[in-house]
Amino acid sequence: MPTPHQYITSAVTLNELCARLRDSPRLALDTEFVGEESFVPKLELIQVATDHTAAIIDFPAVLSREALDGFWEIVCDSRIQKVVHAGRQDLDLFAVHAGRIPKPFFDTQIAAALVGFGPQVAYANLVQRVHGRRLDKAHTFTNWSARPLSQDQLAYALEDVTFLLAIHDHLHSRLSKLGRLQWAHEEFSRLEGVVGETRREPQERYQRIRGWDQLKPRAAAVLRELAAWREGEAKRRNVPRSRIVRDEVLLHLARHPPRHQDELRNVRGLHASEVDRNGESILATIQTALALPSSAWPVLPKERKSEPESNGLVELLQAIVKARAVEEEIAPTLLATTADLQELVDAKTDRSTLDLPLLKGWRRILVGDLLLDALDGKVAFTVDPHSRTIRWSLSVPTTDG
């Protein structure tokens, strides 16, 4: 069970903890938060561990801005390695509260996928496979905003960082032996970019709404402006986006833009209270979007018209990807998605310059160039009759004579 000095509820105890953390070369970090009722998830607990100490910070209980700033300074110290597991949401929250993404960081879920543990392995699963310890999952759905927290809840939360540094050691060693540390750093850089996207311009938010690319360009312009308006309103009121207007309602408004309040009130799924509060703003946003010239409309993705043989080629590439994944003991989905392979097949020219993950960094070395050669007819494939594995070799061009 956590001891009193491990449960941080005041500026004094947080300052004492920071003194113990400051000289550590690495920190294991995790968070517990509640995200259902606010625009930015409400941070409740921060779990932190070094090789010599572990603690839980009760974030709402620590009211001192100065003490928290001191903690964020340590978390963002570039000399300290931050270790997280499936850390996108944790890094998002740290970036919101600290004002920047803590770097450098090491994500054990990503690293585990690169050494054969499979994609998106859970922390508890990793602990069991590396340490042989089965973690208690009794508090998986705990309401972390409720107080007081029980000793069992605190012990459960602390376990999320208790084994993280040892797992980091194990994975770092395996990555080094396999020569894949650079692969991991490339993936961490990709994750950093994704974290940055969560704070991208509001006018780009519409692209996260499923079905936006099926709209006509003018309707897509309406959706873009409505989504940007909703982003600002949700942030201002600190409520979830869906509490303002749901995605499907925004799509309907984009397809069938109302002209006045009565039409707006007849839109199914749009709450009357929201029309009372923001009806004029919604209508004004729609009118502004409709008045935009066609040059300001979003550029929609080109509709793909796959040729009849396309599907067969995608399946061939999938077989190659699976063969390489088996050889390297990593998950095929980590190398390439079906959508990426389809785009590679559909491109008739300049395939090698496509902006696809499989054509960058370690993925290109491992499988990307092989896929390009396969589509260019530069390699021949056979099946080993004994091992039933796919083999390939440079194809020899035939000559007449």
Image (spheres, rainbow, N blue to C red):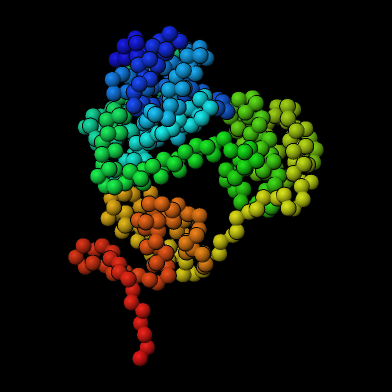
Residue 249 found in image quarter:
top right
View extreme (bottom): residue: 401
Name the residue rendered at 57%, 46% in the picture.
210
Can residue 309 be seen in the rendering of this structure? Answer: yes
Name the residue rendered at 62%, 38% in the picture.
201
Against 52, residue 107 (above or below) is below
Residue 167 found in image quarter:
top left
- The x, y position of residue 87, in whole percent, is 42, 33
View extreme (left): residue: 386
Name the residue rendered at 40%, 10% in the picture.
13
Residue 128 found in image quarter:
top left
- The x, y position of residue 185, in whole percent, is 38, 42
* 176 with respect to 243 (left or right): left
Name the residue rendered at 63%, 54% in the picture.
300
Tally of marks: 0
In the picture, which quadrant includes the N terminus?
A: top left
- The x, y position of residue 264, in whole percent, is 75, 37
Residue in front for this viewpoint, 384 or 261:
384
Can residue 118 be seen in the rendering of this structure? Answer: no
* 33 with respect to 39 (left or right): left
